[in-house]
Image (tube, rainbow, N blue to C red):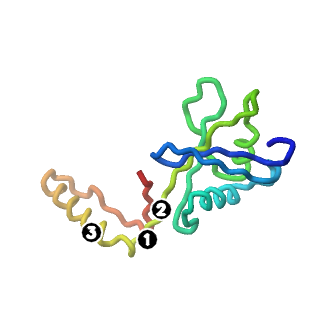
Amino acid sequence: MDSSGVVVIHFDHGGDRHISTLVIKGRYEEITYSHLVDRICKKMNIDVAATTLQLSYFPLVVDNKRPFYILDDEDVLGYLMEVDKKNRRSVLHVELSEIILENQSNEHFSMNEEILSDARANYGMVGVGNCSSKTIRWVRP
């Protein structure tokens, strides 16, 4: 944040390697997790109700190869406050997950179940691939 009270966040989203920018007016402490998710969804023109986001970044720690996942308001504040000597921060990585309800995807999964049943029969893989979940999440490639 500079003296004008504006926070700039750069984020990538998926395989297209395109980096987008959010400009949010206010102080770091005023930016919540839900506000950040809403702004990202608005920028990407996606439905907040049908999509979940997973936010992560690589902290500015020497030789850090593990991402840090942002799960709540405190994590957002930590991300926003972590800048280097030139006042730069890591690019935020956004993974999109669409929520597919069972009744919306019966046709897709019945076809996959048929293929899986054939594979189990051919290779003796009894009990593999059984799913009883009502909600299924998948990540867009």
Furthest residue to the right? 3
Task: Note whether 35 is above or below 100 in the view shown.
Answer: above
Q: How many marks?
A: 3
Identify the element where label 3 is drawn: helix
Q: Quadrant of residue 43?
A: bottom right
Mark in the foreground, 2 or 3:
2
- Label whose residue precedes the other's in the sequence (1 or 3): 1
Q: Which mark is residue 98?
A: 2
Q: What mark, if any, has residue 101 been given in the picture?
A: 1
Identity of the residue drawn at 25% across and 64% down? 113
| Mark 1 residue type | Leu
The answer to whether 89 is drawn above or below residue 123 in the figure is above
From the image, tell me which residue sits under label 3.
110
Percent of width and height locating residue 19: 57, 44
Q: What amino acid does circle 3 point to?
A: Ser
- The quadrant of the rendering that contains the N terminus is top right
Q: CA distance from mark 1 to mark 3?
A: 14 Å
Secondary structure beneath label 1: strand
Determine the residue positioned at 66% across, 58% down. Answer: 39
Nearest to the observer: residue 113 or residue 138: 138
Residue 77 is situated, as x and y percent measured from the top left of the image, at 75, 46
Q: Quadrant of residue 114?
A: bottom left
Distance from disc 2 to disc 1, alpha carbons, whole Å, reads: 10 Å
Residue type indicated by callout 2: Glu
Q: Is residue 15 left or right of residue 115?
A: right
- Residue drawn 51% across and 55% down? 96
Name the residue nearer the viewer: 21 or 64: 21
Query: Where 4 sits versus 113, above or below?
Result: above
Are the residues tagged 2 and 3 within 8 Å (C-beta)? no
